Image: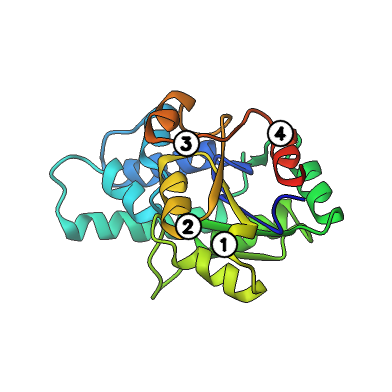
Amino acid sequence: MKYELAIFDMDGTILDTIDDLADATNHVLEQYGMPLHTVDEVKGFVGNGIHKLIERAVAPGADEETVEKVFDSFNEYYKGHCAIKTKPYDGINETIEKLKAAGVITAVVSNKADYGVQSLCEEYFKGLFDYAVGDKNGQRRKPYPDSVFEVLEKFSIEKKDAVYIGDSEVDYKTAINAGLDSIMVTWGFREEKMLRELGAKTFAHNPEDVGKIILE
């Protein structure tokens, strides 16, 4: 076994959340009379947390007060609509089960609001993760390594024995900042070419690849 701890990103890595994120974003933008966005446009907005998603999605020139109002409306709506079209990527549950059966500790570190991380883990991955942490007050979000360090400390795992699995430039930078190896998945919200240009070296083209890399 190459790693004792596998830390996963959520959106674009274990869960295909983009349709619910796009629907919720457009729902609140419509409320405020702002232009709507395509799913592909919303893909480009995600990765740095919900607040940054809203900042990028609102009409150009919107003032800070308006951004905060849209953000609050998004949070209120998304809490009740975060699991409408969302679904795990094919094969990801089986991979996590295989890792756990081999004795690997599994965790989630996401920039999604912590309420969303906890509810979605319960909805789609009940019993599969030993720990999960999302964006919460008082803690810097990815690419800062704070949440990753929280997981390492909780399980007393050294950096060399942990790996971070994600799909975006934010995830790659998080692994670098935390001093962890990374596995970048190619089925998420970013193109492999862009991730390779950043310097990523290890890629998984399907969930089974993740298991093979970790357990080799």
Looking at marks 3 and 4 on the same chain, the residue that comes earlier in the sequence is marked by: 3
- Marks 2/3 in contact by CB < 8 Å: the verdict is no
Looking at marks 1 and 3 on the same chain, the residue that comes earlier in the sequence is marked by: 1
Q: What kind of residue is marked 3?
A: Ala
Looking at marks 2 and 4 on the same chain, the residue that comes earlier in the sequence is marked by: 2
- Marks 3/4 in contact by CB < 8 Å: the verdict is no
Give the CA distance from mark 4 to mark 1.
21 Å
Q: Indicate which disc residue 159 carries.
A: 1
Q: What kind of residue is marked 4?
A: Asp
Q: Is residue 6 left or right of residue 169?
A: right
- Furthest residue toward right: 101
How many other residues sit within 10 Å of disc 1, few (<14), some (14-19) or many (≥20)?
some
Looking at marks 4 and 1 on the same chain, the residue that comes earlier in the sequence is marked by: 1
How many other residues sit within 10 Å of disc 2, few (<14), some (14-19) or many (≥20)?
some
Q: Quadrant of the C terminus?
A: top right
Q: Which residue is mark 3?
A: 200
Mark nearest the camera among 2 and 4 is 2
Q: Which residue is mark 4?
A: 209
Residue 29 visible, this orientation: yes
Q: What kind of residue is marked 1?
A: Lys
Res 34 → quadrant: top left
Disc 1 secondary structure class:
helix
**Residue 109: percent from left, percent from top:** 55, 58
Res 94 → quadrant: top right
At horizontal 53% and vertical 58% (from top left) the residue drawn is: 79
Q: Indicate which disc residue 179 carries.
A: 2
How is the protein colored in the picture?
rainbow
Q: Nearer the viewer, residue 171 or 90?
A: 171
Disc 2 secondary structure class:
loop
